[in-house]
Image (spheres, rainbow, N blue to C red):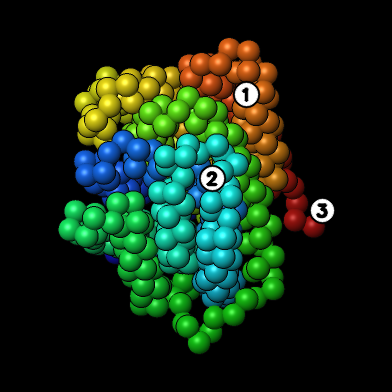
Amino acid sequence: MTNSSVDLTKGPLLKPIITYTIPIILTGVLQLLFNSADMIVVGQNCGSISVGAVGVTGPVINLLVNLFIGFSVGAGVTCAHGIGAGKDEDVRRTVHTSIPISAISGVILTIVGILGARKILMLMGTPDDAIDLSTSYMRIYFLGITSSMIYNFGSAILRAAGDTKSPLIYLTISGVLNVILNLFFVISLNMDVSGVALATVISQTLSAALIIRALMKRQDQCKLELRKMRIYRRQLFRILSIGFPAGLQGSLFSISNVIIQSSVNLFGSIAMSGNAAAQNIEGFVYTSMNSVSQTALNFTGQNHGAGKFDRIKKVLGICLGFVFAIGLSLGLTAFFLGKPLLSIYITDSQEAINYGLVRVMYICIPYFLCGLMDVATGTLRGMGSSIAPLIITITGVCGFRILWIFTVFQRFRTLENLYISYTVSWSMTFLIELAVVIIMLKRSGISSDLPKNL
């Protein structure tokens, strides 16, 4: 744990990138392990229908939450730029603007999530035998969403300052509590999915309290003083200018996933259960790759603030190679261990496991393409550009998948045909984003070489 910002603009890159990324990977994996504990406890004690009931809420929760999570990306990039440029007062104002924004975002999400849960699940075609459980889970989950927002904003600030270890420690502490409460609420009190949702709310509150405490104890420009919290107009504009397109991108991305989930729901609750379990497994591959994207974002952010564009090129190359290795190795591992892994989640339906194996095969093996795409996205955002990845993602991921579902999938209605749309969309989007990154780096390099009085 550190109380001062780490300079990411000097020295070698390979080792710092790896050491910076590993705690983020561990944080994400631990978070997924604790989320998996929700589904495993439910699956072992309540059956496959309850597993599907929890799993079907994922795309809906992401749809509602991702817009505001994008604001935390904006806060992190703004902090990284300020740290790289040596603008301490800008960083202080960003920190004291970010926490109020996170709290406001949480309140809005709580209201929308609780009131809209059942209607959205009905629009998705959630099966009748799962919709009551899913609605109950979502409504309780959104009671604690403010704490989740505070944790995400606080973590973004700490990572921008070079501290990736503290979020890992705090998540570990809250995650252990989550598992203990899962077992107590579900096994001892027979609360089914409501129990795992309540456990999540309590553990998220603890993680938010720990992240606020960490910010208050810092001795650098990222120190949080509660009495100084206010929304500074300039910092708010900067956070929103980067964060809103990033959040909108995430929400639109989720819309395509909601439509895909709705298509999966057409195959019935057993297919829905297998799909949910497989999604949980592939989440470990995704979060490991996405950690490299966060590294690319923050290293790029500080170096962009310092005007060191040659280092950004090196960061991009290292991160692309790193994410390819992680994605391919973990994707193949998930494929070859698919059946025993799925059996951990689903104990009462071989048919559901078979459905899950289909998703694992079509998603996990080419998953490294998604990682390459995310690194390109993180680099663009680190350079202060959120509009370009927004437009590219709308077209290459969201638009393409929706078009695929209403054309190709309608003619050949199989799960295999549905899942193929992921691979094609990742490939197209990555190639376009990479081209945009190269163009922006060339332009930035030319601009930095011009005399300052021009």
Is any atom of residue 298 visible in this view? yes
The residue nearer to you, when weighing 168 against 209, is 209
Q: Nearer the viewer, mark 1 or mark 2?
A: 2
Kind of residue sitting beneath label 3: Leu
Q: Amino acid at mark 2?
A: Leu
Q: At numbered mark 2, what does the secondary structure look like: helix, strand or loop?
A: helix
- Left or right of 32? Residue 318 is right
Q: Is residue 288 visible?
A: no
Mark toward the start of the polypeptide (1 vs 2)? 2
C-alpha gap between disc 3 and disc 2: 57 Å
For discs 3 and 2, the disc positioned in front in the rendered view: 2
* Quarter of the view holding residue 387: top right
What residue did someone put label 3 on?
454
User: Badge 2 is on which residue?
Assistant: 121
Whichever of callouts 1 and 3 sits on the residue coming sooner in the sequence is 1
Q: Amino acid at mark 1?
A: Ile
Q: Which residue is mark 1?
A: 405
Which percent across, then down, holds residue 119? 58, 50
Q: Is residue 14 above or below residue 186?
A: above
The quarter in which the N terminus is drawn is bottom left
Percent position of residue 81, x then y: 57, 59
- In the current view of this chain or complex, which residue is farthest to the bottom? 227
- In percent of width and height, residue 165 lies at 31, 57
